Amino acid sequence: MSTIKFALASLKRMAWVQGESTDRMLHINASVERMDAMIEHVALSNKIERTEARGLEENVSALELMNVVMQEYRDPDRFELDIQDGVMFRAAPHFLALIVENLVSNAVKYAAEGKIKITIHDETERLTSFRISNRVAADHHPDESRLFERYYRHPSFQNSPGMGIGLSLVHSAAQKMGAQVRYQKIDHDVVFEVRFPR
């Protein structure tokens, strides 16, 4: 993949110097980027399945984690965050970040109008809850029976970027950590909640 990218970059430079159109090369480059992302996701999925999360737990500040995650998004006003003061996750940091980043990315990708709401609270002395909800169009609600199936994508989004791997990664990582992932449909909102043991 790196060789193909390098060759494309060279061709684009040549086309620019000669004043030729680069549309075809841009299309090829987009295809290469999608393939590269798919390979990385599949490799990550296999790595999760082979790696044990138990014994790697650390105390992770929910506020610090969300500050890092939110840096990826240019429109902070799109989010409504409710983070309990001083709340900490007791989790393997890599697995925790993977879960949170994928759920936030999914919400951004599929949300209709309205705020993306994120709540992080200590539910009990033994459970910390991460909850994210967003509104979607009435005909865009996912098939609950296939939600965490690898490569499943809603028919309306087949031509949009993505490979249907994110939620399967979330589910696998949560299982490794002893966490529970729950999905709910409330009116036009989709709600994902992950309950992490402490």
Image (cartoon, rainbow, N blue to C red):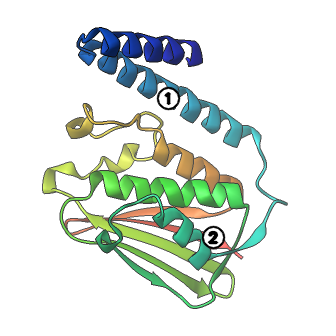
What residue is shown at x 48% (from left), y 45% (from top)? 166
- Could you say where residue 118 lies in the image, as x and y percent from the top left? 42, 74
- Could you say where residue 69 lies in the image, as x and y percent from the top left? 51, 63
- Could you say where residue 101 lies in the image, as x and y percent from the top left? 51, 57
Q: Secondary structure at mark 1?
A: helix
What residue is shown at x 15% (from left), y 50% (from top)? 139
The residue singled out by tag 1 in the image is 38
The residue singled out by tag 2 in the image is 196
Horizontal arrangement in the rendering, residue 95 relative to residue 36 (left or right):
right
In-front residue for pair 79/125: 79
- How many callouts does the rendering have? 2
Q: Residues within 10 Å of mark 1 (few under 14, many from 20)?
A: some
What residue is shown at x 41% (from left), y 69% (from top)? 132
Q: Residue furthest right?
A: 55
The quarter of the picture where residue 54 lies is: bottom right
In-front residue for pair 143/192: 192
